[in-house]
Image (cartoon, rainbow, N blue to C red):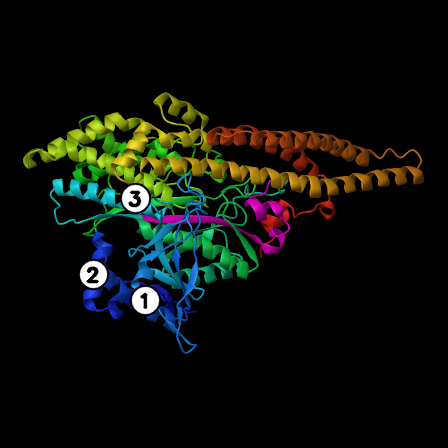
């Protein structure tokens, strides 16, 4: 398709502002627009008109059903499809869709994770239309983005607390801007761009790996002779079939209004990335969920399997999802743009120090927000940021902060043109700071990049924490400045910036986050180093964190407690499934191949000695000896893993159970994998019951 048709294609399946403006009566459009912009209540008569218009639009595009599309605590999306048909007395049907059906749905709330909020017999739950996220059509169904709550009103999803956090940040940021004299600002939106990493592998090979199908990662498997050490895959030439997949993925996402912008090969073999244009946080989260779904769907059409696990392969990089975050006012101003004179930009420095304060005070919550069983394999593995949260501000801002600390005027460095030594190349101005890929939370010019989230994660969680923590920090800044005489405001603001910098200086680190020296330094600074989910999760119940969420009406205490239970339960279940899958693969499949090869080697050695008197059979004997050693180790490791799994069934406390899975079961799995992988390196592929790393990672064309 030619590029000229992209504007026509983009958003063609979305009931967006353009469609509403064209199809809704003016008064109805204004009412809906007011609801989206200000969060005001939508009357039922308005909803009825919107529903009728939405139905007619959807029918024109071939839709026959509608669904309330929501994001329960599984981290995935959920949907129940109802047709538009309504039977008539003459045996026919008419197509109906009411405002009530648009605004409210009633899914079963007891069958989703609730952390004790709902019992099995307490089934009623509600979905509520989110008009700020446009409806869309997919596979002949009208999808209506919704929030999901229990019968008694508690949030059972990711969207509700995200919307709450966006509102509280908007209120706090707007208040500070009014203090600074920008009273035209009516709201502040957080914007997000999520860079999505993923692996593509051959679908037929994927179907031969039980571990990939059931757990999303390989639980056994010796490394391929080649990994990523040649550094030849990152930004490398796209393979033709991969390029076709990416082209089709772009088309599908553009139809749904997802602003897919950048695509390229990533560091590891068969690893890739898609990055979108920034959007309002709520829509960005919805679109990232759609992106992950469409990646899998389009991959299947191309006979690929798309892997979104954070660590599908041992020994090479895993996949993350960088969360690029900023704040935009209703007047279109980016509050994280330092301008040409950042040292004198009081507004920028106040918002910067608000963020620095928030990250320092609530670094434990930021770690909790990205904690999953999969991401634990990735963080701190010299391929992703460490589990220690810190902030990188870059050379230019570091000098600004140093001048504030020392009470000196900041003199910006002159803009420098990049010198390449080749005169034919164009001249351009060099950026005032480098990038630091080892930093968990890095300032990158006019936004912060939170690099800790894993590839399969819903980015609602980190944005909920970030929004709420920053709102609290901005509230504290407002409390210090709201009664200051306007003529003294700039002076007092700069004093406050200096005070906050001194208090939270420890969280700023511009060095290499991969080193052991940084781990030791971070400990001296008193920073958290929460290496695993069981270690991190209790922090969500810390007094200061509960007070934060309750004060800003993002979570109630019972909602916090339920999430604590859900995350721990999910962690334990994930590792249990992995352990059982590993045992099944080793006992039923791998052992059979191992023994068959040992038998073949033994027969070969015996036959050789029968034919050739005095034959030493050195090679056969050496391999058999090593395989026998591996077999013995495998048997013992299987027994220990089975025994320890049985012991976990006796543990009733959720944190104790998760800790047992981390400390004992994962260690047992590592102990089993080591001899299996060692044996695999000696066994011909014809005896192996599954495809090797070499085939999985290097078979794409």
Based on the picture, tell me whether residue 202 belongs to the magenta stretch: yes
Q: Which residue is mark 1?
A: 54
Q: Are marks 2 and 1 in contact (CB under 8 Å)?
A: no
Instruction: Look at 19% across and 62% down and name the residue there.
Output: 30
Camera-nearest residue between 477 and 611: 477
Which dot marks residue 31? 2
Numbered range of the magenta stretch: 192-220
- Which quadrant, please, contains the C terminus? bottom right
Residue 104 falls in which quadrant of the image?
Answer: bottom left
Q: Which residue is mark 3?
A: 447
What separation in Å lies between label 2 and label 3 (alpha carbons)? 33 Å
Q: Characterize the local packing of mark 1: few (<14), some (14-19) or many (20 or more) Cα atoms within 10 angstroms.
A: many
- Across and down, in percent, residue 433 comes to 31, 39
List the single residue furthest toward the front.
Answer: 89
Which label's residue is closer to the chain start, 1 or 3? 1
Residue 1 falls in which quadrant of the image?
Answer: bottom left
């Amino acid at each position: 398709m030619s590029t000229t048709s992209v504007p026509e294609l983009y958003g063609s399946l979305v009931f967006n502002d353009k469609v509403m403006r064209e199809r809704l009566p003016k008064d109805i459009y204004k009412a809906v627009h007011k609801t989206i912009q200000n969060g005001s209540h939508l009357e039922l008569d308005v909803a009825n008109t919107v529903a009728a218009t939405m139905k007619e639009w959807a029918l024109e595009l071939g839709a026959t059903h509608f669904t309330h599309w929501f994001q329960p605590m599984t981290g995935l999306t959920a949907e129940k499809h109802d047709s538009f048909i309504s039977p008539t007395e003459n045996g026919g049907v008419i197509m109906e869709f009411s405002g009530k059906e648009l605004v409210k749905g009633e899914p079963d709330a007891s069958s989703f994770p609730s952390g004790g909020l709902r019992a099995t017999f307490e089934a009623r739950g509600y979905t509520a239309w989110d008009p700020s996220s446009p409806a869309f059509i997919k596979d002949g169904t009208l999808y209506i983005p919704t929030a999901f709550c229990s019968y008694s009103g508690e949030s059972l999803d990711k969207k509700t607390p995200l919307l709450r956090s966006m509102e509280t940040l908007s209120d706090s940021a707007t208040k500070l801007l009014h203090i600074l004299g920008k009273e035209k600002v009516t709201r502040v939106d957080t914007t997000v761009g999520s860079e999505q990493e993923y692996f593509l592998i051959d679908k037929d090979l994927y179907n031969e790996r039980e571990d990939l199908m059931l757990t999303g990662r390989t639980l056994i498997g010796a490394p391929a002779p080649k990994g990523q050490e040649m550094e030849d895959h990152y930004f490398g030439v796209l393979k033709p079939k991969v390029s076709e997949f990416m082209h089709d993925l772009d088309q599908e996402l553009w139809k749904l209004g997802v602003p897919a912008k950048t695509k390229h090969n990533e560091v590891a073999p068969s690893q890739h990335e898609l990055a979108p244009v920034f959007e309002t946080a709520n829509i960005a989260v919805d679109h990232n969920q759609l992106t992950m779904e469409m990646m899998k769907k389009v991959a299947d059409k191309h006979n690929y399997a798309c892997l979104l696990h954070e660590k599908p392969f041992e020994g090479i990089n895993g996949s993350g999802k960088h969360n690029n975050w900023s704040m935009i006012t209703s007047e279109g101003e980016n509050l994280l743009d330092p301008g040409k004179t950042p040292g004198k930009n009081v507004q920028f420095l106040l918002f910067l120090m608000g963020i620095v304060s928030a990250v320092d005070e609530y670094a434990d919550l930021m770690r909790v927000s990205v904690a999953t069983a999969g991401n634990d394999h990735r963080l701190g593995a010299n391929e992703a940021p460490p589990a220690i949260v810190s902030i990188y501000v870059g050379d230019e801002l570091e000098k600004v902060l140093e001048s504030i600390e020392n009470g000196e005027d900041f003199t910006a460095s002159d803009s420098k043109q990049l010198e390449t030594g080749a005169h034919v190349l164009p001249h351009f101005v060099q950026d005032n700071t480098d990038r630091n890929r080892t930093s968990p939370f890095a300032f990158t010019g006019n936004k912060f990049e939170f690099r800790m989230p894993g590839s399969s994660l819903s980015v609602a969680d980190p944005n909920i924490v970030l929004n709420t923590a920053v709102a609290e920090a901005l509230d504290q800044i407002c409390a210090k400045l709201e009664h200051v005489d306007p003529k003294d405001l700039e002076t007092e603001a700069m004093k406050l910036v200096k005070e906050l910098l001194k208090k939270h200086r420890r969280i700023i680190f511009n060095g290499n986050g991969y080193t052991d020296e940084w781990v030791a330094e971070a400990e001296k600074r008193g920073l958290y180093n929460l290496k695993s989910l069981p270690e991190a999760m209790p922090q969500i119940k810390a007094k200061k964190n509960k007070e934060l969420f309750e004060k800003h009406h993002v979570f109630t205490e019972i909602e916090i407690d339920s999430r604590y239970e859900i995350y721990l339960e999910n962690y334990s279940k994930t590792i249990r499934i992995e352990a059982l899958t590993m045992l099944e693969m080793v006992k039923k499949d791998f052992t059979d191949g191992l023994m068959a090869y040992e038998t073949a080697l033994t027969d070969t050695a015996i036959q050789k000695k029968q034919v050739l008197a005095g034959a030493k059979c050195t090679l056969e004997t050496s391999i058999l000896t090593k395989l026998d050693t591996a077999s013995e180790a495998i048997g013992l490791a299987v027994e220990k893993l089975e025994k320890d799994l049985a012991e976990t069934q006796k543990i009733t406390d959720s944190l104790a159970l998760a800790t047992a899975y981390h400390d004992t079961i994962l260690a047992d799995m590592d102990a089993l994998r080591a001899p299996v992988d060692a044996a695999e390196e000696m066994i011909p592929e014809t005896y192996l019951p599954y495809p090797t790393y070499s085939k999985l990672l290097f078979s794409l064309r």
